[in-house]
Image: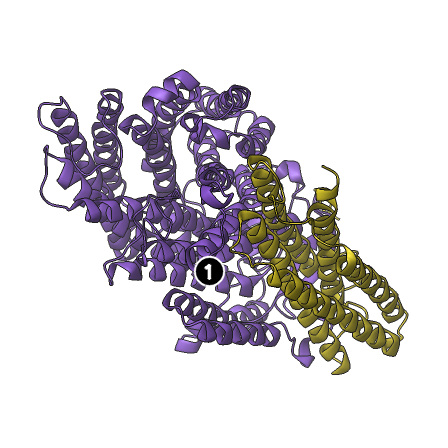
Chain colours: A purple, B yellow
Amino acid sequence: MSTAAESVRISDDAVLQRLTTLWRTPPTLLGWLATVDHKILGKRYIYTAFVFFFLGGVEAAVMRAQLARPEGQLLSPDAYNQLFTMHGVTMMFLFVQPVLSGFSFYLTPLLIGARELAYPRLNVFSYYAFLFAGLFIYASFLVGQAPNAGWFNYTPLSSVVANPGLNIDFYALGLLFLGIATTVGAINSIVTILALRAPGMSIDRMPLFLWSSLTISASIVFAMPALTVALIFLQLERHWGFVFFDVARGGSPLLWQHLFWVFGHPWVYIVFLPATGMLSMVIPTFCRRPMVGHTFVALATVVTGLVGFGVWVHHMFATGLPQLSMSFFGAASMTISIPSAVTIFAWLATMWFGRPVLTTAMLFALGFVAQFVIGGISGVMTAAIPFDWQATDTYFVVAHIHYVLAGGTVFGIFAALYYWYPKMYGTLLDERLGKVSFWLMFVGFNLGFFPMHLSGLLGMPRRVYSYAPGSGLAIFNLLSTIGSYVLAVGIVVTLWNAVRSRRRGVAAGPNPWGAGTLEWLTESPPAEYNFARIPAVSDLDPLWTNAVTAGASLDEDRLTPRTTPLDATPEDVVALPRNDVWPVAIALTLTLTVVALLAGWYWVSALATALTLLGLARWMWPSRARIGATQS
Amino acid sequence: MTASGIPVDRLPTEPRRVRADVGWWGMVLFCMTEATLFAYFLGSYFYLGVANPAWPPAGVPDPSLRLPLLMTLLLVSSSVVLVLGERRLARGQRAHYHLGTALTVLLGLGFLALQAAEYREKLAHGGPATSAYDSLFFTITGFHGTHVFVGLLLLTWTLARSLAGNIDPARPVAVKNASLYWHFVDAVWLVIFTCLYLSPRWY
């Protein structure tokens, strides 16, 4: 690394002092609540998501205990329904997407050489809205009425006739609330990536993780409304007598399925693509060479996001749709394997032409590749309609989704954790514990989930609380249970490693892996203002090619440069907002709105909405002192 | 100048006029996600329309055009008035801008009053619970009415800010955002008008 590059950390003491004063988070309760620091909030996202990961894991562990032997007596059918629904809801909505968002909100400004996200206060709101929505959904356990119609919540099972309790209301209102947080977070990412990149970081010099973030954020903008519409229909039908899904009065239950999967399949890529983006950062670093086929991988990411909107019907092959429609969607689903293969071969080529170093992060990346290939193959199998008719709603599909999302995404998240933990905390995770954790997870995962392919092919239906003895399923289920517990032990080892290494880990220094992207120019952990001097870059992997120069300090206010979306030519300097509690207040009043809707106190809900609007008006009202400098 | 060819030591440090502000991009994306929301609403309308033997179902007349045509006129003219007012702001004539915005708000209120009258007529023949068709009609128009209401709040809020001297005429981001949202709500109405009021007459 050149001294020229290092000088982005260096400036004279008076300047550093001014920057620290401008950007710091006061160590008070108010400071803690009001901070807009993307690094603090990103970590909070990750912590909170891991708490939900733990809860979702406990749900899975209880279910595996129930299924360890035929005719298990641990759970009633109703309790089992609530557990598998909450396991799915938790992992899909409260763990994987938020933890990826957390990494993205933490890393994006560092990766692009900026000092903050484009909308720092909106980030505060997204975090608290996510937290409160998650707590709201989990409050359903307190009244014993957790959602119980599966994470995709088909009608008429979720209709008020079949399901009169609060279960589905928790699901629908909670996800509507969470949808707001997710959408504004996505908008924040898009604008940050397109407007705040360092001077010179033209779109072709943008790290691949940002291509993933950009793609999935755009997918969220266009996919989330489908779920919102479906949930609005559901609640209007359940509580206000409207008709959308009831055939007798002109509705159709398939409308729910279409709307849900128009959202749901893009969502699968939304929770998958960021992990591939992380791998595309980890693999080049530990292969000691630039990524092979950078441009093709970037394009493959975007194509996957786009084609993801054209494959939703493959979740509905067994619902009696017209042959032509099924053939079209079957073919489209197989098309997805092409961009996925481009990415995988680019990773393999990077390893082939590089000199791989088998750190824990790299091991998790390799585990991801192996398991994702298996999940991809079972995906192509189920894209073939005749096969899908046999496998649908069996454990084969359970195996498929877990190979992609647990074997893929979760292993990617762990690779990211081992890779970026030193940046976040300034100390390295213990490699020995890391390797123990990886092998436990790798063996446990495959032991747990591979047998599900077989129990599925033998006809074991998913979402049923028990199975008969003598059906030939017992041995596979026992293996699945043992494997999932080994997996859980492996996960706990990493969590223990993370806690332990904060104090006992080896000091990392700015760039422990000798990586090539901008986040490794900052101190570990980065200073409040990220970069003491604004970097400008002229290459991909600028740290490897000496392509960074340190620019102005911009210490008059909370300033960061703004550049053009494609060429990243400097255009302007934007003044970013300071710490603010109003976003927290808005998240609270929205929570009150949702709770009141659940309880049927409609006037309270209306009042809380009015308060939300007033709060927004106050939030967006700039102080006179900053007129001319603010960008709101 | 540096080796990379980027004059980093000469970055503009003063905020200056640019074509589009960071805040404006947020509003563009917000309108895009909202537009998608209405697209899914209307997609559901046509999906159930195809699934039903008759749409609107037998016994339900095609929606009357009398009030909606007037409502369309009000919204379209409100957008024109708003654009005229905003142009005056750019030339520093704040009073004209205030007048234009206030007039837009009045026209928007007129739209909501007519929608209320239309609802009263419709509710006399059975509410949203009658059939899937009625449910969709009330949900889609009701959501749009809510958007009009939010647009009015946004315009009023911007007007209040301007009256309080809290808008920078060199960078009127809030004004631009409120207008963008208002034009978006108008455009959505034109699509809804075409789909819900005109299209039943074509088949």
Residue B160 occupies which quadrant of the picture?
Answer: bottom right
Q: Where is residue B141 in the image (x, y as percent from the top left)?
A: 64, 57
Chain identity of mark 1: A
**Quarter of the image where the C terminus of chain A is located:** bottom right
User: Dot 1 corresponds to which residue?
Assistant: A240
Q: Is residue A93 left or right of residue A11?
A: left
Between B9 and B183, the residue placed more toward the observer is B183
Q: What x and y, as percent, mark residue A311?
A: 51, 29
Q: Can residue A278 be seen in this view?
A: no
Q: Is residue B25 above or below residue A205?
A: below
Between B126 and A146, the one nearer to me in the picture: B126
Percent position of residue A135, x then y? 34, 61
The residue nearer to you, when weighing A387 against A627, is A387
**Which is nearer the eye, A247 or A95?**
A247
Horizontally, is A405 left or right of B35 in the view? left
Amino acid marked by disc 1: Trp
Q: Badge 1: few (under 14), some or many (20 or more) residues near its Cα, within 10 Å?
A: few
Residue A599 vertical placement versus A345 (above, below): below
Instruction: Look at 35% across and 39% down and name the residue there.
Output: A410
